[in-house]
Amino acid sequence: MSSKKNQKILISILVVCSLLLLIGCNDVMFSNRSRVLLVSEGEIAQMSAQSYSEIKAADKIITNNSQFAMVKRVGERVAQAANNTLLEAKNTDLLNTFKWEFVLIDSPNVVNAFCMPGGKIAVYTGILPLTKTDDDLAVVMSHEVSHALAQHGNERMSQQLLVGIGSSVLNKVIENNSPEVKDAYNTIYGVGTTFGVMLPYSRLHETEADKIGLILMAKAGYNPQAATGFWERMSKLGQSKPPEFLSTHPSDETRIKDIKAYIPEAMKYYSK
Ligand SMILES: [Zn+2]
């Protein structure tokens, strides 16, 4: 056999092995849904950490008042619940990508909050009038953390990659630091336009984050029943002046009804 042919076979084996390592059916926690993830979560976490540093440098960060203390207190408990959930699922690969950080951004007109992959969380002061208690704030933070925990960002990037390039060049894309992965990240996370503005999640991802969020807040010791009031207040605010949070999290009767219906399940995790 010629060495050229050997080389070709070797390359093919390597490509198949990398594909099998990185692509695989991956189940979403607390759900029976499986999906394909193409990008290394560690690589996304690195890009997120970079964006997060840029956001922190560009915005006014509050670090020394009772509002920030609340964000940190609630965030740390929700993060601990998320870590425990990953440990229980024996998903140490994903767990290791999380380096939790919390900031409160002084922006009274921005009604928003987010958690990027890798656990980089921001709460804008504009959402705090809707979250008077720790339970209320836990509704928001747990929901956002759930998007990261369920790797919705990776799934959206993977969909983007599949649509954009087709599976024939997948072996090129899965390399770390490939331009295609960076492009997909920038598109999903709005980098280059306005920081912190993400493409809206799909309805499916929203429903999943609502459900996982209720369980997560319950595990963190916060009462999931607070979710109904929060989403009703948010929905009311949307009638006068739709805030940023609603542009990515449309709130309607169906959403609130689904949340109410799921609370009894979440209550099983509360005060355990
Ligand atoms: Zn969401």
Image (cartoon, grey):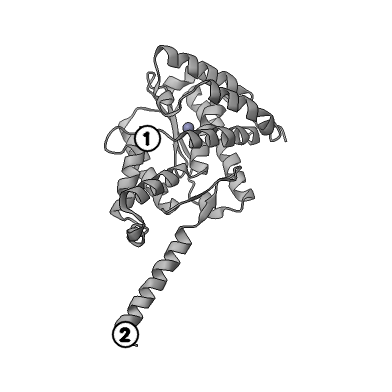
Residue kind at label 2, given as amino acid type: Ser
Residue drawn at x 39%, y 14% is 241
Q: Could you give the CA–CA distance between mark 2 and mark 1, rounded to whole angstroms?
A: 48 Å
Image quadrant where residue 134 sits: top right
Query: Is residue 111 something that shows in the picture?
Result: yes
Query: Is residue 135 something that shows in the picture?
Result: no
Between 218 and 147, the residue placed more toward the observer is 147
Residue kind at label 1, given as amino acid type: Leu
Mark 2 and mark 1 residues within 8 Å of each other at the beta carbon: no
Above or below for 163 versus 247 = below
Are there few (<14), some (14-19), or many (20+) residues within 10 Å of tag 1? few
Above or below for 22 versus 122 = below
Q: Which residue is mark 1?
A: 199
Numbered badge on residue 3: 2
**In the image, is 268 to the left or to the right of 210?**
right
Residue drawn at x 54%, y 37% is 208
Q: Name the secondary structure under disc 2.
A: helix
Image quadrant where residue 212 sits: top right
